Amino acid sequence: MDKDYLQVKGRIFDIQKYSVHDGPGIRTIVFLKGCPLRCKWCCNPESQSYKIQTMMVNGEEKIMGRDVTVEEVMEDVMRDVAHYRRSGGGITLSGGECLAQPEFASALLQAAKAYGITTAVETTSFADFSMIEDKILPFVDTYMMDIKHMNSAKHQLFTGQPNEKILANAKKIAMFKGENLIIRTPVVPTFNDTPEEILEISQFARSLPGVKQHHLLPYHRLGSDKYEGLERDYLMSHIEPPTQEKMEELLAVAKTTGLHVQIGG
């Protein structure tokens, strides 16, 4: 592989090993810095700003964010190649929003393909489709895309951005990825946890060409302590996670669309 290609630089804040919930098989997740959304429930608030930050963790300062090359990331990722080969796993790009660093994300995906491991992204797809088509879609095997709400005003109230671009991109991405496009919905009380809201999202997912899966991801409070470490207020502190009974109710409603629907990734 061209050495210049491997020297493309980007900014990450974490690499997690041995995930089984972020794409097929055993995966290494690379978390990229920066996100255009500001979801009130975000469990990785240190990911939102592209800037390198200091966060208090267990009473000690921790630097959140570091600049790395594709080569450095792949050296770490490929230490577990035996697990990928055995399980059909590979690398997953997450964030933040991995599409916020398109050159770096594209170079990572291309490197992974060159090394013979599977690729996946977790994304809101709040980005220009021309970039997604050119830099991401040719190099990704599994495309996991959030559809958080069908109502743009409510979407903007809870995430800071409208949803028209996201919904339009979903239709276009489905034309390329079909059954390899997985729609995911974080189920957040007071935001989108009514049967009507979940059914509307699942019906939209069902309308996308080739799409067969819709994953419902229950809201949790993991990461809420990070806000204090960043000297920020956690705006969802009054919200309780959905009960298992509630999730089962929403699961049953979503399944009426004929999609494969599951709780969790």
Image (cartoon, grey):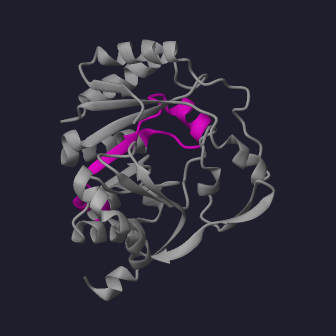
User: Foreground: 126 or 74?
Assistant: 74
In this rendering, the answer to whether 121 lies above or below 163 is: below
Q: Where is residue 232 in the image (x, y as percent from the top left)?
A: 77, 48
How far from the left and from the top, in percent, is residue 130? 31, 59
Q: Which of 91 and 84 is in front in this view?
A: 84
Image-quadrant location for residue 181:
top left
Q: Which of 59 and 251 is in front in this view?
A: 59
Outermost residue to the bottom: 3
Q: Which residue is drawn at 30% across and 47% down?
A: 25
**Stretch in magenta:** 135-164
Which residue corresponds to the image point at 32% horizontal and 58% vertical from the top-left? 132
- Please check the rendered image and state whether residue 121 is part of the magenta-colored stretch, yes or no: no
72 or 105, which lies in front?
72
Q: Residue at x 73, y 40 (%)?
A: 234
Q: Quadrant of the N terminus?
A: bottom left
Seen in the picture, residue 184 relative to 206 is either above or below; the reply is below
Looking at the image, residue 159 sits to the left or right of residue 199; the answer is right
Q: In which quarter of the image is the C terminus?
A: top left
Q: How many labels does the image show?
A: 0
Q: Residue at x 36, y 13 (%)?
A: 252
Q: In the visual, does 85 lie left or right of 45?
A: left
- Residue 163 painted magenta: yes
Residue 45 in percent (x, y) is at 64, 50
Q: Is residue 160 above or below residue 193?
A: below
Question: Is residue 133 visible to us here?
Answer: no
